[in-house]
Amino acid sequence: MDAKDIMNVGVIGCGIICKNYLSNMVGIYPWMKVTACSDLIEDAARAMAAQFPGLRPMSNAELLADPSIDLVVNLTIPAAHFDLSMAALKAGKHVYSEKPLALTREQCEILCAEAKSRGLRVGCATDTFMGGGIQTLVKLVREGAIGKVFSINGNMLFHGPEAFHPHAEFYYSPGGGPLFDMGPYYLNTFIAMMGPIRRVCGMAVRGTPTRCFGNGPRIPKEQIGRPIEVHVDTHINGLLEFASGATGILTTSWDVWGTDTPNIEIHGTDGSIVFTDPNSYTGLIKLRRANDENWQELHPMHCTECGRGIGIADMADAILHDRPFRASGEMATHVIDIMQSILESAASGAAVTLRTSCPVPEPLPPWLPLGRLA
Ligand SMILES: NC(=O)c1ccc[n+]([C@@H]2O[C@H](COP(=O)([O-])OP(=O)(O)OC[C@H]3O[C@@H](n4cnc5c(N)ncnc54)[C@H](O)[C@@H]3O)[C@@H](O)[C@H]2O)c1
């Protein structure tokens, strides 16, 4: 492949999720080459680079100044996303960020406007909706397998990442919480199936004012039991009204110890679908059409071997071929607007009409092998 047909990628933020990205990006998509990584902690960048061929550890400043790097992937913590993504755009690089794209809809709009004014692109996780499980779900719903959809329910019920994440403080600061952290997996799935949302209501509570680190394998011994201050709501009920007229409920919680509720249920005029965790590139679909006596289990009809980074590969290919891409900054902005508006509604007691919308991501063709998007 000619150098002009390849996007060079630099990754900033070499923490827990970085290795997962690199394992699913390096050597899989011929048009994308990861060439550099940086972190505030130099050793973290060095250790990450040592595990992948072709990666050079750098400082943030070196990475942003390197003219060979076309696209920056921002895998830092939410509070750092806006400033670093803006710095990357100002350095002339396209940006793909981990979620949330920024802390507020206003910051997201500033990033997207900055990119547009410079002829650059902004993309954002989550990209699990491009995996085989959700793509199969999208195909079924969009092709009318359960008729006209009138209700979608999402339930992310769990007891918080402090059990296993050694830097869990960021999950309880602005930009974290179960809604901002996990909501994007659900909302991107909902938008890919049903299009944008026009109005929301919310109610939210905060289970406890502090949480304590658990004893997961990554938590250092001396950290176990250390308190974390909670600065965000930790159980949030959101009511959704789609532009199509369908309704939905999204409950996200880090206060729940146990549940039997499915992650996603979709109800239409001709049947219902139950789906597993949207934080996955695979999944199991249960379909029950009108008058069926039993549920039918369906397995993915799309590639399930992909992982975090398929959205970046799609974005890189889109830049090379001047086409739209799926995990877009516009969709991420709409998702932040939905989540921020649910929290604003919870505070004010009034429904909020959203000011943003977004393009609906194009479904992927079924049965593509890993490393192909068309
Ligand atoms: N851990 C997960 O399971 C997971 C899964 C999906 C998405 N995410 C998202 O990925 C992002 C990172 O999560 P993580 O779990 O890897 O966090 P982490 O704390 O383990 O890693 C973040 C890394 O970013 C570095 N960093 C922070 N500010 C920086 C800056 N200004 N410049 C350079 N480096 C900087 C830190 O030193 C750290 O190494 C978050 O937005 C999170 O929501 C995490």
Image (spheres, grey):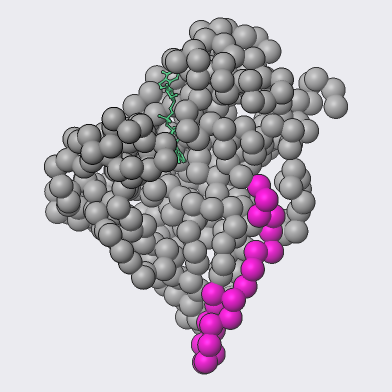
Left/right placement of residue 222 relative to residue 122 reads left
Q: Nearer the viewer, residue 309 or 124?
A: 309
Q: Residue at x 57, y 67 (%)?
A: 284
Between 76 and 358, the one nearer to me in the picture: 76
In which quarter of the view is residue 156 placed? bottom left
| Residue 67 image point, x, y percent | 65, 9
Residue lying furthest front in this view? Answer: 221
Indicate the quadrant of ligand 1 in the picture: top left
| Residue 118 shows in the view | no
Q: Is residue 38 magenta?
A: no
Say if 154 sits above or below 254 in the image.
below
Judge left or right: residue 215 versus residue 148: left
Q: x, y percentage for residue 219?
A: 36, 35
Position above or below: 265 against 341: below
Q: What range of the chain is rendered magenta? A: 286-306
Q: Residue placed at 62% from the left, 20% from the top? A: 49
Q: Residue at x 15, y 47 (%)?
A: 208
Q: x and y percent of residue 85 in the render?
A: 47, 22
The answer to whether residue 298 is magenta is yes
Question: Is any part of residue 242 visible from this angle?
Answer: yes
Main SS class of the magenta portion in the image? loop
Residue 215 lies, in percent from the top left, at 33, 42
| Residue 154 falls left or right of residue 47 | left
